[in-house]
Image: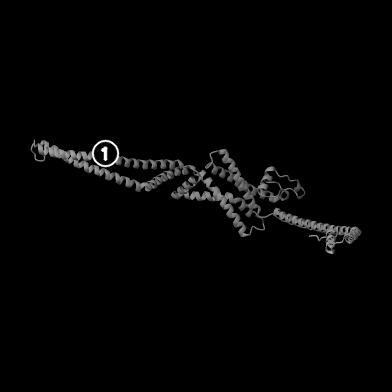
Amino acid sequence: MQESVGSFSQREQYVPSGFTRFLWWLATAEEELIKDCTVDRNRYAIIGMTVLGTWLFATLAWTYFFTTVVDSLFTSALLGIFMGGIVLGIDRALIKGIDKYNKRKVWPFVFRGLLAFTIGLFMAQPALLYLFNKEVQLQISLDNEQKKRDKRQQQDTLYVAQKNELAAKKQSLQQQLDTKYAEVSSAREGFIAETDGTGGTKKVGVAAVAAAKRKEYEKLDQEYQQMTATILPQIRSTDSALAAIETSIQNEQRTFNALLNNGFLTRIEALSNLIENNAALRYRYYLLVAILLLIELMPVIAKTLLPAGVYDEKVRMRQEQETAIAGSNNEHELRLKEIYNHMAFEHDEALIRSFFETTQGEREQTVKDELKNWKDNGGSFDGFWTRIKKNLLTKQEH
C-alpha cells in the first residue's frame, strides 16, 4: 500500500497495482486523476479498505440472515452477495457525494449518517444473533413453551362456556339418577330389613308388610331402570361432546406447535427477551451494536474526517474544465445550427422566387386559355373564377 515518493519528474512512471486500483474504485476515486497525487493515493486506498470491510461484513450478515429463512445454503449465499452489492452501491454513493466543499454542511452529513446508521442497525441484528446463537436457542425454547401455555389458556377460555354448559347438564342428569338410585336403595334396604326382622315391624314372617315393601321397591327399581335407559344416552352424548371439544383443542394445539420455529423474527424476539432479563448481556449487547454500527459508518466517517488533498482540487478543476468545454461546444453547435438555418432560408427563398418567375408565363397562358374557353362555351363568371382559383392561385403554407 505504501508507495515511495519519487521526484517530480518521475511521478508519471508510477503504475498502481490491480488491488490498489480496486481500492480506488471502492473509494470512488478517478484513477486518471489520483495516480499523480502522491499523498492522496494512500488516503483513498484507506477509504477503499473501509468500504471493502463494510461490503464483506454486509455480505456475511445478509447471508446469515437468509439462512434463517431459506433452507439452501447456496441460495442464502447468492442472496447475501446480492444484498451486499446493494449496500456497496449505497456506500459508494454516500462517499462520492462528500467532498471538501460540503463537509461542513450539516444536513447532507446528517442525512448520510442516518442512512448509514439505519443500514448498520439492521445488519447488526444477524451478527448479534450469530454471536449469541446458543443463548438465543435456549431462550427460543423457553419462549415457545410459554407460547404453548398461552395458546392452551386461550383455547380453554374460548371453550369454557360450552364446556361448563355441558358439564352442568351432565351433573344435572347424573344427580337425577343418583337421587332415584338412592330411593331404590332405601326401598330395597327397607324390604330386606322387614324380611329378616332387623327393621320395620321387626317381626319375622309378616308377609303382608314385606310384600308391600317389596312391591314398592320393585316399582321404584322399574322407574330407575326406565330413567337409566333415558338419561344414560344423554350422559354419554354429553361425554362425547366434551371429548370432541378436548380433541379439537388438542388438534389445534398440535397445529400451533408445528408452526413454532426458530426463524429470524423468532430469534429477534428471543434476543430481546434475553437482553431484557439479563443485565450482564444487555451492556455487552449495546457495546457490540455500537461496534457493528461503526463498521457501516466507517466509510462516511473516514471520508469526512480525512483532509482534502490535491485530488479534490483536481476534481474541482476538471469539473470546471469539462463544464467550460461543454458550454463552449454547446455555443459552437448553436452557432452552426443558426448558420445552417440562415443559409437554408436564403437558398429556399431563391428557389421559390425562381419557381414563381419560371412559371409566370405558363400561368398567364393558362388564364388566356380558360378565358377563351369561357367566352366560347359561356357560363357564369363565378364558375369561371372558381376554376381559376382552384387551378392557378396558390395556397398559404400552414
Within 10 Å of the Cα at label 1, are there few (<14), some (14-19), or many (20+) other Cα atoms? few
Secondary structure found at label 1 = helix
Instruction: Out of 116 and 211, give the one closest to the viewer.
Output: 211
**Left or right: residue 334 compared with residue 221:** right
Q: Give coordinates of residue 59: x percent, y percent.
A: 59, 44
Which amino acid, by three-letter code, is at mark 1?
Answer: Ala
**Left or right: residue 198 compared with residue 237:** left
Instruction: Out of 294 and 178, give the one closest to the viewer.
Output: 178
| Residue in the image at 12% along x and 38% along y | 210
Q: Give coordinates of residue 108: x percent, y percent.
A: 62, 57
User: Where 162 sits versus 346, above or below?
Assistant: above
**Left or right: residue 71 compared with residue 247:** right
| Residue in the image at 73% along x and 55% along y | 319
Q: Give coordinates of residue 26: x percent, y percent.
A: 65, 47
Instruction: Out of 249 and 205, give the one closest to the viewer.
Output: 205
Residue placed furthest toward the bottom: 381
Residue 197 in view of the camera: no
Residue placed furthest toward the left: 203
Q: Which residue is mark 1?
A: 229
| Residue in the image at 59% along x and 41% along y | 78
User: Where 388 sits versus 19, above or below?
Assistant: below
**Left or right: residue 238 compared with residue 290:** left
Residue 178 in view of the camera: yes
Q: Quadrant of the N terminus?
A: top right
